[in-house]
Every structure is written in structure tokens, then in C-alpha cells.
Amino acid sequence: MSDILFEIRAGVGLITLNRPKALNALTLSMIRELTATLLAWRDDAAVQAVAIRGQGKEGPFGAFCAGGDIRFFHQAALAGDPRLEDFFTEEYSLNHLIHQYPKPYVAFLDGIVMGGGMGISQGARLRVVTERTKMAMPETNIGLFPDVGGGYFLSRCPGRLGEYLALTGHMISGADAVAAGLADVFVASSDLPGWWDRLAAQGATAEPAGQAQAGQSQLALARGQIDAVFGLASVTQIVAALEADMSPWAVETVAALRKRSPLMLHVVLEQVRRGRQMSLADDLRMERDMVRHCFHLRPGAASETVEGVRALAIDKDHSPRWNPARIEEVPPELVQAFFDSPWPAHAHPLRDLR
């Protein structure tokens, strides 16, 4: 069975990610299939709209996409596999294609939506969430940063929610996603099959209509604290402010930050703040530079990302040996190195993005 299923019905291109056991994590071949199909459909007058979902373990919904295949990243980085470079270049090009897509693109974000799953959904014309949605950009947990355009779309969340979500990797609900501007409508998960079938039968006129807001957003309740703390100038100041605040929210938040890669926390704060002033294309070029540095500034097992994936997904000891070990020990020059492009502009792998 293919990892992605494609069909056209009633003028709608229907895409089902079909690796439910892997929570539909994206492989390089899946990225290539998605790109080739979306390019073909873009120029096909018979396709008027596109819809995408993830196959769940129990049925056609229940998990959208858990992101990129991090085991592949680990293996490829240690082996010097050139496909690692191709993965990120082609993934970011796909993200850009979706954001710029000239036809309505509807993403059904049921269940897990993380990392690369955000990359193939945040550019959608309509982003549909449910009570089962679990959305996050948890990359600082594996010594990476919220890529796939995260610097662009997180920085455009209200207030300082972008900094908060990028640094902590905090998982949010469907109601939170709407409040953060990362989703458009909320529907009951039990209604998704009906909406999908209506799209397949009636075409683009049957776009899902749900509530703009459903239930209380915990994120909205914490907005005052989030904006006050995550608007501070540096990660060191953010952590100091949280440690001076004995509220349960502050204690929980600083505990999460203390587990993340200290180096990447500093890099990510800089990424989000730069991304706020950038076009999507420029942000993706910056992120392509950054991800190259994640694997090459300190190659092989010395890479913060390789170590983070090892601890979480390979050895599963959940004890990453971060270097530097503490937020207060990260030198500014180490952070700035992530933003120096390894390529001249004319040779950048994403130079053609507009």
C-alpha cells in the first residue's frame, strides 16, 4: 500500500497520508510525491480544489502528521547520506508551494499535527481542527528549531504566542490553535467523514463550515503572562523572569525550557524575531541555512540535533547531553553562526523561491 493515496473526485484532488503506524511522518519519497502531484494539479483545469488528511490507526482520520522522519535524520547525519540535504530543500520548497497554491487547499488537522505536518498545512486556505487536535512545534526538544516556515507562521501569532510555542514546544488543542491563528474552523471529529464525502461529491463548494472558536482556549487564558515574559529581550531574561514567578504556569513553563537544548533556545528566539520581518521565501531560505548548520557546524554525533534525536527516539533514555549544558552558558557567537548562510545568494538551494 502506498504511503500517500491520491484521487480526483468532483473536481477536488483528495490526498490521504497513509503511514498510520508512523503517525504519517513524512519521508523524502512522500515529499516528492506530494510535490509532483500538487504541481500537476495546479496546472490541471479538472482540479478546482485540494483537500488533505491523515489516515488514523482506527479510521480515515485521527492523526494528521507527526512531522519529518527523525530516525532518518539521525541515520543520514551519521552516515553522511546526501539525501538529508535533499530532504530539507525539497520539504521547504513544498511548504512554499502550498502557501502560494492558486487553488483552495483544505487541511483536515485531526489528531497529531507537528513539525512537518504544520509545514504542509499552515499554508492552507482553510485549516480545520477538532477536539482531538494535538498541535505543536516541539523541535527544541530534539535540538532542532521550528522549521518548515515556523519562523514565518509562528511569528505572526498574536502577541508573543509565537515565541512561547517555538521555545517551549508546548502542545495545544484545537481551540488553542484557532485562538493562536494557526487554524480557521473547529468541527467535531465525528463530522469529518461527512465533510470529506461532501467535498468528494459536491466539489469545492462544500468547504467545511465550523465554529470559529470552540470551548475555552487555555492559551488565551495565559496570554497576559505569555506576552509579558516571552516579550523579553533574551532567553536568559525569560528564564529569570519565570524563576522569579512562583505561579504554577511559570513553574511548569520554566521546567519545560530547562529540558530543551539551551543552544537551540537562543537560536529559536532569534529565528522567530527575524522571521517576523521576513517574507515566507526569505524565512525559508534562512531556515535552510539554519538546518544545514544543525548538522554541519558540529558534524556527526557532536550535532545538537543528532544528540537530541538519539535521546528521544533512538536510545530513548530521555537524557540528552546538551552542549552547552545550561541556558546561561551559550555564547552569542555560537548563536549567530546559525544565521550565516553557507551559500552565496546565487547558489542557495532555495534561490528560486519568490
Image (tube, grey):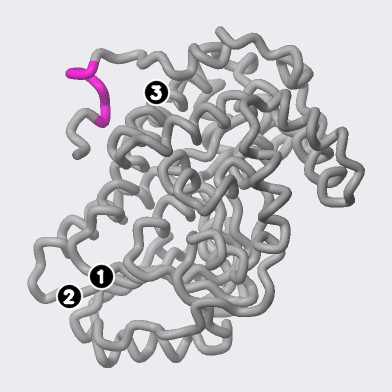
Q: Residue at x 58, y 73 (%)?
A: 62
Taking 18 as reference, is 207 above or below it? below
| Inter-mark Cα distance, 2 to 1 | 7 Å
Extent of the magenta region: 345-350
**Observer-nearest residue: 225 or 45?**
225
Question: Is residue 236 one of those drawn in magenta?
Answer: no
Q: SS at mark 1?
A: loop
Residue to which mark 3 is pinned: 289
Q: Which amino acid, by three-letter code, is at mark 2?
A: Gln
Which residue position holds label 2? 48
Are dots 2 and 1 in contact, CB under 8 Å? yes
Say which of marks 2 and 1 sits in front: 1
Residue type marked 1: Pro
Against 101, residue 269 (above or below) is above
Mark 1 surroundings within 10 Å by alpha-carbon count, few (fewer than 14), some (14 through 19), many (20 or more) = some
Q: Mark 1 sits on what residue?
A: 104
Outermost residue to the right: 246
Instruction: Specify the amino acid type for callout 3.
Output: Asp
Estimate how packed mark 2 is, as few (under 14), some (14 to 19) or many (20 or more) residues with alpha carbons within 10 Å: many
Please name the residue shown 64% across and 73% down the image: 132
Q: Is residue 248 left or right of residue 297?
A: right
Which quadrant would residue 152 be assigned to in this image?
Answer: top left
Q: Secondary structure at mark 2?
A: loop
Residue 347 in the image, given as x and y percentages of width and height: 21, 18
